[in-house]
Image (spheres, rainbow, N blue to C red):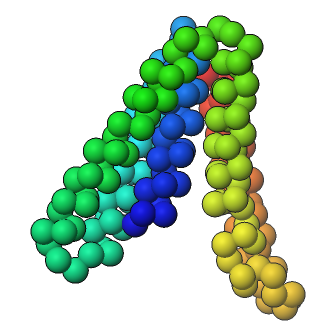
């Protein structure tokens, strides 16, 4: 619960900083991307948070506090980074956000990081390894194509 709240809050703060420092059409596409995945992050946080508590009253109070905090971090990042729009510091903030997003995305989805069976060198697993790598490459390629298209 609390550790996930901390991690997602840091992620949301970077989202807000990136959105606040961006301008024009880039801001709208970034806003839509944040809007689309923030609901999934909030749902994951809520389920994890409620699963960790036995008493309903304590769970409800802490749940509301956690959700209020999580929902306020992105707007806080926007407020902090809006004066940086168009400056060289704003470019650094966007680069930090993009690098963090890429790192999280690659670590969470990269074949072999989350699945210990990939480190097994038995020959019968080569087919499964290839399928997972092909799906990973196809997903990466589709997102790259989507980025180039928009």
Indicate whether 138 appears above or below 72.
Answer: below
Left or right: where does residue 38 sit relative to residue 109? left
- Residue 35 vs residue 83, the one in the foreground: 83
Q: At which x and y percent is residue 128?
A: 72, 77
Residue 146, position as x, y percentages in the image: 63, 32
Residue located at (72% from left, 39% from top):
99
Report if residue 39 is visible in the image: no
Residue 49 in sight from this viewpoint: yes
* Rendered view: 79 above or below 132: above
Spot occupied by residue 75 in the image (x, y as percentages of width and height): 40, 29
- The residue shown at (75%, 71%) is 112
Q: Quadrant of the N terminus?
A: bottom left
The vertical placement of 36 against 4, above or below, is above
What is the tally of numbered marks visible in this picture? 0
Residue 96: name its quadrant: top right
Residue sitting at x 86%, y 87%: 121
Residue most extreme to the left: 57
Residue 74, horizontal then vertical, whole percent? 43, 34
Left or right: 68, with 32 as reference point: left
Q: Residue at x 64, y 43 (%)?
A: 101
Quadrant of the rendering where the C terminus is positioned: top right
The front one of 72 and 22 is 72
């Amino acid at each position: 619960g609390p550790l996930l709240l901390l991690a997602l809050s840091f992620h949301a703060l970077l989202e807000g900083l990136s959105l606040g420092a961006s301008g024009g059409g880039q801001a709208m596409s970034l806003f839509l991307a944040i809007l689309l995945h923030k609901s999934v992050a909030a749902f994951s946080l809520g389920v994890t948070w409620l699963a960790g508590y036995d008493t309903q009253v304590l769970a409800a109070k802490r749940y509301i506090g956690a959700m209020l905090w999580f929902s306020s971090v992105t707007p806080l990042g926007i407020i902090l980074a809006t004066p940086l729009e168009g400056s060289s510091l704003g470019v650094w903030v966007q680069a930090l956000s993009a690098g963090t997003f890429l790192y999280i995305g690659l670590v969470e989805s990269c074949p072999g990081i989350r699945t210990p069976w990939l480190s097994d060198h038995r020959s019968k697993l080569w087919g499964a390894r290839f399928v997972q790598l092909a799906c990973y490459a196809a997903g990466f390629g589709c997102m790259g194509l989507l980025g180039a298209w928009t």
